[in-house]
Image (cartoon, coloured by chain):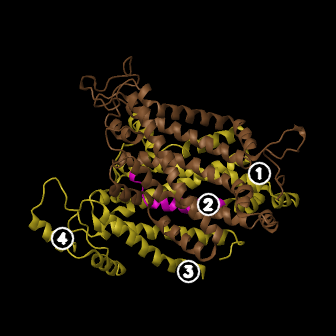
Chain colours: A yellow, B brown
């Protein structure tokens, strides 16, 4: 019931998002045909007719909606003869592979650091983990990216500074992308673990003679991971949307760059398509987290 | 609610009369705890220094930050230019000082705008509940579903180049988190027994607001604001880095990044200095935010 309601709610959300984007996009001064050399009026007229810009706004919006409902996001205004769907599908695997890699890395390092720090509370191990988490959470991604380029790429020369296509190109952007979520997950895991470790039911579990592993796995971790799940969803969604800064810094041809380029070039078709596409992904990621909640924590009922 | 229910950490419940009959209020108590936290004091000191620099940048800077001296391009750090000069012969140190002004202004004013939208909306939703709550929160959901940097970029392109509009754009997009937080706080407090008791005893609404709702509900909001400042600074730096934030001659951490990146190999200090400046600023706000959270919530422990 809950899942169904959430999926149905996606409809109005997408409608509103597309409407707001449409209005804002046309409020932005300038148009897709602005370039260094001015085009002859006849050419602009033809272009407008081809892309439907000669129609009134409401008609443009409605025909966009009608096409989008059939899964057709239309043509890109700037990249000739490419559809928006093609462009998005080219960028998607790039961003997705980075996002998955970064999410896995962030979960592994974040959880490890958080759990270790909690079990060694107020020792140097704990302080080291907390220091990492604080530094990671307060370093802007482009600052970290630059530092990594300076050390790993230019200093040690173990990885290339930028580019895409080979496995070693993944290293710098993935590391840069991982730091912030890893730090965040480490902080949440640590405080949530500390919270759970001191609960009565953990003491009970130990008192009745359960093996330490069983206590930790079944009683501590399972309960401590719920808050982590809360942040994992938004983090995943955030990573999936691609990072403009990191993709620009490392010349990665992902969708994050597409967003920026589409707005800067007033590529109306791509702006609408990319926004809707990502609204769907972000909403589905959040929905997945809500469902996972109920799986992990039987107390939660929708 | 039992403040002593958990075993570890600082227990801030002090028995009245234990050390003279000092009358301590909520805020003086919190301030005392804050000042006992070395990291938070360090953060405060850095922020104070940054604010001083931001205000008096004009007096402290040895050179005009936008003056281009083509006779002194890429000069090494020395007597005349403490941090050298950039590719246009501008004094890096002076640009850094003015960059601090940009970052802090954006960070703080974006928060002001964000809070003035999010706080009343969240409070109204939580207070009135029902239909008002439902429609307001659906609106929040829609804004939240947007890829946020895309929305900021769109708004930014509509509003044009002035620096004031950067924090308007950031504030207009990022208020949803605070609205949710405020709503949650109000909902939670509304159900507390002592609020009910106060109402039963005939307390007027402004008394309840001043005596119960604000003191009990405001701490997480203050903490969220402090953590929000570095996030806005990140956002501004990222926008400037892409080229749609602060407009070029104006120095900011973000604009200095790509300017320095062109010469990263030969003159790494050009990119390291703004990167570190932003890193230290955000670190300071993180320390202060952590300290405030611990200080304002006596039940919390690290």
Labels 3 and 4 share a subunit: yes
Write down the chain letter for disc 4: A
Q: Looking at the rendered structure, which numbered label has been put on residue B299?
A: 1
- Residue that numbered label 2 is attached to: B181
Which of label 2 and label 1 is nearer to you? 2
Q: How far is mark 1 from mark 4, CA to CA?
A: 63 Å
Extreme top residue here?
A: B79
Query: Is A287 displayed left or right of A187 in the figure?
Result: left
Instruction: Relative to A86, say whether B288 is above or below.
Output: above
Q: Closer to the camera: disc 3 or disc 4? A: 4
Residue A104: x and y, percent? 53, 57
State which chain disc 1 sits on: B
Q: Which residue is mark 3?
A: A5
Which of the two labelled residues, at mark 2 and mark 1, occupies the earlier sequence position? Answer: 2
- The magenta region covers A227-244
Q: CA distance from mark 3 to mark 4?
A: 40 Å
Write down the quadrant of residue A23 in the picture: bottom left
Instruction: Point out residue A15 in the picture as x, y percentages from the top left corner.
Output: 42, 76
């Amino acid at each position: 019931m809950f899942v169904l309601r959430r999926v149905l709610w996606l409809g109005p959300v997408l409608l509103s998002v597309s409407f707001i984007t449409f209005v804002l996009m046309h409020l932005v001064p300038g148009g897709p045909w602005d370039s260094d050399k001015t085009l002859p009026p006849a050419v602009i007229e033809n272009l407008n007719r081809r892309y439907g810009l000669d129609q009134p706004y409401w008609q443009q919006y409605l025909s966009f909606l009608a096409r989008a409902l059939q899964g057709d996001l239309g043509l890109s205004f700037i990249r000739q003869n490419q559809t928006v769907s093609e462009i998005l599908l080219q960028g998607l695997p790039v961003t997705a592979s980075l996002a998955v890699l970064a999410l896995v890395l962030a979960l592994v390092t974040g959880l490890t650091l958080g759990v270790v720090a909690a079990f060694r509370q107020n020792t140097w191990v704990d302080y080291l983990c907390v220091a990492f988490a604080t530094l990671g959470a307060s370093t802007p991604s482009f600052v970290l990216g630059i530092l990594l380029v300076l050390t790993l790429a230019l200093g040690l020369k173990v990885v290339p500074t930028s580019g895409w296509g080979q496995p070693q190109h993944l290293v710098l952007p993935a590391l840069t992308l991982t730091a912030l979520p890893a730090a965040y997950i480490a902080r949440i895991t640590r405080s949530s673990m500390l919270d759970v470790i001191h609960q009565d039911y953990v003491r009970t579990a130990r008192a009745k003679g359960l093996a330490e592993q069983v206590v930790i796995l079944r009683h501590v971790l399972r309960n401590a991971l719920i808050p982590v799940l809360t942040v994992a969803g938004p983090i995943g969604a955030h990573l999936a949307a691609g990072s403009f800064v990191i993709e620009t810094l490392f010349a990665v041809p992902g969708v994050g760059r597409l967003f920026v380029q589409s707005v800067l070039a007033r590529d109306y078709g791509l702006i609408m398509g990319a926004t809707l596409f990502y609204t769907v992904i972000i909403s589905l990621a959040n929905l997945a987290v809500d469902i996972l909640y109920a799986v992990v924590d039987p107390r939660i009922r929708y | 609610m039992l403040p002593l229910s958990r075993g570890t950490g600082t227990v801030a419940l002090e028995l009245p009369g234990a050390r003279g009959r000092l009358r301590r209020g909520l805020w003086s108590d919190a301030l005392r705890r804050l000042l006992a936290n070395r990291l938070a004091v360090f953060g405060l000191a850095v922020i104070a220094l940054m604010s001083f620099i931001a205000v008096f940048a004009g007096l402290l800077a040895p050179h005009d930050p936008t003056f281009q001296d083509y006779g002194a391009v890429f000069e090494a750090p020395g007597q005349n230019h403490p941090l050298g000069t950039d590719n246009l012969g501008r004094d890096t140190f002076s640009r850094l000082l003015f960059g601090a002004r940009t970052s802090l202004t954006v960070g703080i004013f974006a928060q002001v705008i964000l809070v003035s939208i999010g706080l009343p909306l969240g409070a109204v939703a939580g207070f009135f509940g029902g239909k008002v709550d439902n429609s307001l929160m659906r609106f929040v959901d829609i804004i939240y579903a947007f890829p946020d940097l895309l929305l900021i970029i769109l708004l930014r392109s509509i509003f044009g180049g002035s620096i004031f509009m950067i924090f308007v754009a950031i504030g207009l997009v990022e208020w949803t988190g605070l609205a949710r937080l405020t709503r949650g706080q109000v909902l939670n407090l509304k159900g507390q027994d002592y609020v009910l008791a106060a109402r039963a005893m005939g307390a007027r609404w402004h008394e309840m607001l001043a005596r119960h709702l604000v003191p009990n509900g405001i701490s997480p909001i203050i903490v969220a604001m402090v953590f929000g400042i570095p996030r806005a600074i990140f956002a501004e730096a990222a926008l400037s880095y892409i080229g749609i934030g602060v407009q070029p001659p104006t120095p900011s951490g973000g604009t200095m990044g790509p300017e320095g990146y062109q010469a990263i190999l030969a003159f790494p200090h050009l990119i390291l200095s703004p990167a570190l400046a932003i890193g230290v600023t955000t670190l300071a706000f993180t320390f202060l935010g952590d300290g405030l959270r611990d200080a304002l919530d006596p039940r919390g422990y690290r």
